[in-house]
Amino acid sequence: MWQILHRNPRAFFAALLLHLFLLGMTLVSADWFAGERKQLRAPRVIQATLVEETAVSVGTAPAEKLHQSQKVKRKAEEETRRRAEEERLAQLRREQEAMEQQRKAEEKRLAALAAQRKAEAERKAREEARRKAEAERKAREEAQRKAAAERKAREEARRKAAAERKAREEAQRKAAAERKAREEAQRKAAAERKAREEARRKVEAERKAREEAQRKAAAERKAREEAQRKAEAERKAREEAQRKAAAERKAREEARR
């Protein structure tokens, strides 16, 4: 009950006021019946007065005829009072039915207002979730951009080092060419060493290419797993929202019952 009062205080106080009003109407109705009973007792004196007036006016009329006339008149007055009482009770019932319809309309309006507030809260929650997801996406993109910039810088440094190494190797080649006559054996050894370095460079390049492919595949797998995790979280959030909505609807139905 306190939970219903906390959620819909206006509906609770409206119902309380309605019950107080109906109680007051019941008490007033009880007073009216007491007044009617007093009125039902009053005509005896009036009939006595009418008897005297009739007796004076009729004079020699028989007593039985006078008594019959008084019974007919009293019966007509009682019928009139009965009909008036029935009309008053019918009017009271109509007023109570109108008040009940007004109460139901107010409860329906409050329920619609609560549903609207709930929908607004859910919409704000969805917007907040979208904003958070957008912020996370931008953060990931920024991190990827920084990583790409750092990777590009490392690649540039490697290219520069390779160019410098190539320049040194060219200088060594020229020097070896000049010493070709004197150092043919050394040139052959240098050529073999260069072939080995080229093979090693090729192997290193292939290894780096494989590692780069593996890194890209891992990044794509991680992205797919992240997308699946987000989808699962959103599905659970929707199921939780549906469960809460069903619980609240059941609580409102229970409150109405």
Image (spheres, rainbow, N blue to C red):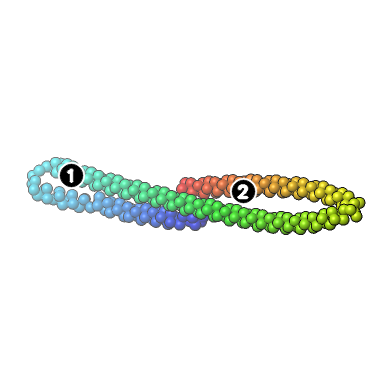
Front: mark 2 or 1: 2
SS of the residue under disc 2: helix
Q: Earlier in the sequence, mark 2 or mark 1?
A: 1
Q: Residue at x 43, y 56 (%)?
A: 10
Residue sitting nearer the eye, 80 or 25: 25
Tell me the element at label 1. helix
Amino acid residing under circle 2:
Lys
Q: Position of residue 209 (x, y in %)?
A: 74, 47
The answer to whether residue 23 is visible is: no
Residue in the foreground of this view, choosing between 81 and 99:
99
**Residue 66: image location, x then y, percent:** 14, 44
Instruction: Please tell me which residue is depicted at 25% across the width and 44% down the height of the picture.
Output: 83
In depth, the one of 207 and 202 nearer the eye is 202
Disc 2 residue crowd, few under 14, some 14–19, many 20+, Cα 10 Å:
few
Q: Nearer the viewer, residue 39 or 59?
A: 39
Question: What is the CA distance from the residue labelled 2 to the residue labelled 1?
Answer: 90 Å
Q: Is residue 250 visible?
A: yes
Amino acid type at mark 1: Lys
Task: Tell me which residue sits at (41%, 55%) in the image.
Answer: 14
Which residue in the structure is indicated by mark 2?
230
Q: Is residue 246 left or right of residue 16?
A: right
| Count of all numbered marks drawn on residues in the image | 2
Q: Is residue 38 left or right of residue 202?
A: left
Position of residue 171 measured from the top left corner of the image (x, y, whole percent): 80, 57
Could you tell me which residue is drawn at 52 percent across and 48 percent down?
A: 245
Question: Alpha-carbon neighbours of circle 1 within 10 Å: few (<14), some, or many (≥20)?
Answer: few
Q: Mark 1 — residue?
A: 73
Instruction: Decide if residue 210 is on the left or right side of residue 127.
Output: right
The single residue placed furthest to the front in the displayed view is: 181
Q: Is residue 142 left or right of residue 105?
A: right
